[in-house]
């Protein structure tokens, strides 16, 4: 059986940052690594869940909203996937940084944080999401935080 693309990446070489993990026609999959894989420091589910709610809402209201197909957490709890149609890598990096800054500046209820909107609405914590976004934004300020290949 053929291995899926994400299993062909050497996770021991990945650092915090954003990577183009694959391109399928006009769809680019970005690997947003907020944590170093296999380092023993993983997001808890509350953090991942809340970042998902906040980031997905902000990015789907951003300048690239018409091209965003998906944003969601990795099962390994070291980051997120962002799928964008007709992506310009530099623009996507700019939008990711902008969205992280918007989350950090936000002071209100978690988007989609009610029983009617979410299947696990009690498992949300904006402070934890902000801490994750702050550390990731700091990582994205470092040289080489963006790579066109994982």
Image (spheres, rainbow, N blue to C red):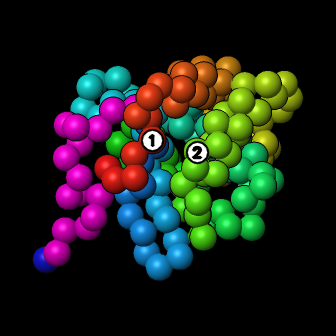
- 13 relative position to 122: left or right: left
Residue 89 appearing in the image: yes
Is residue 105 in the magenta section? Answer: no
Q: Are marks 1 and 2 in contact (CB under 8 Å)?
A: yes
> For the residue carrying disc 1, how many other residues have a C-alpha within 10 Å: few (<14), some (14-19), or many (20+)?
many
Q: Please say if 104 is above or below 113.
A: above
**Residue 104's spot in the image, x, y percent?**
72, 25
Report how far apart the C-alphas of labels 1 and 2 lie in the structure.
8 Å
**Residue 59's spot in the image, x, y percent?**
71, 50
**Residue at point 23%, 57% (across, down):** 7
Q: Name the residue under label 2.
A: 93
Q: Find the residue positioned furthest to the left.
A: 1
- 60 relative position to 78: left or right: right
**Residue at point 56%, 32% (across, down):** 46
Q: Quadrant of the N terminus?
A: bottom left
In-front residue for pair 115/103: 103
Q: Please say if 142 is above or below 48.
A: above
Res 88 → quadrant: bottom right
Q: Give the range drawn in magenta.
A: 2-16
Q: Which of marks 1 and 2 is nearer the N terminus?
A: 2
- 73 relative position to 37: left or right: right
| Element class at badge 2 | helix
In-front residue for pair 137/106: 137
- Residue 146 is labelled as 1
| Element class at badge 1 | strand
**Residue at point 53%, 37% (across, down):** 48
Residue 115 appearing in the image: no
């Amino acid at each position: 059986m053929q291995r899926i693309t994400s299993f062909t990446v050497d996770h021991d070489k990945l650092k915090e940052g954003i990577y183009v993990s694959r391109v399928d026609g006009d769809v680019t999959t970005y690997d947003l690594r907020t944590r170093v894989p296999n380092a023993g420091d993983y997001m808890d589910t509350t953090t991942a869940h809340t970042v998902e709610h906040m980031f997905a809402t902000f990015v789907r209201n951003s300048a690239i909203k018409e091209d965003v197909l998906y944003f969601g957490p990795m099962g390994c709890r070291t980051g997120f996937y962002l799928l964008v149609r007709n992506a310009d890598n530099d623009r996507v990096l700019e939008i990711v940084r902008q969205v992280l800054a918007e989350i950090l500046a936000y002071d209100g209820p978690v988007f989609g944080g009610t029983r009617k909107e979410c299947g696990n609405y009690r498992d949300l914590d904006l402070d934890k999401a902000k801490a994750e976004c702050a550390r990731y934004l700091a990582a994205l300020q470092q040289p080489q935080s963006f790579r066109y290949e994982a």
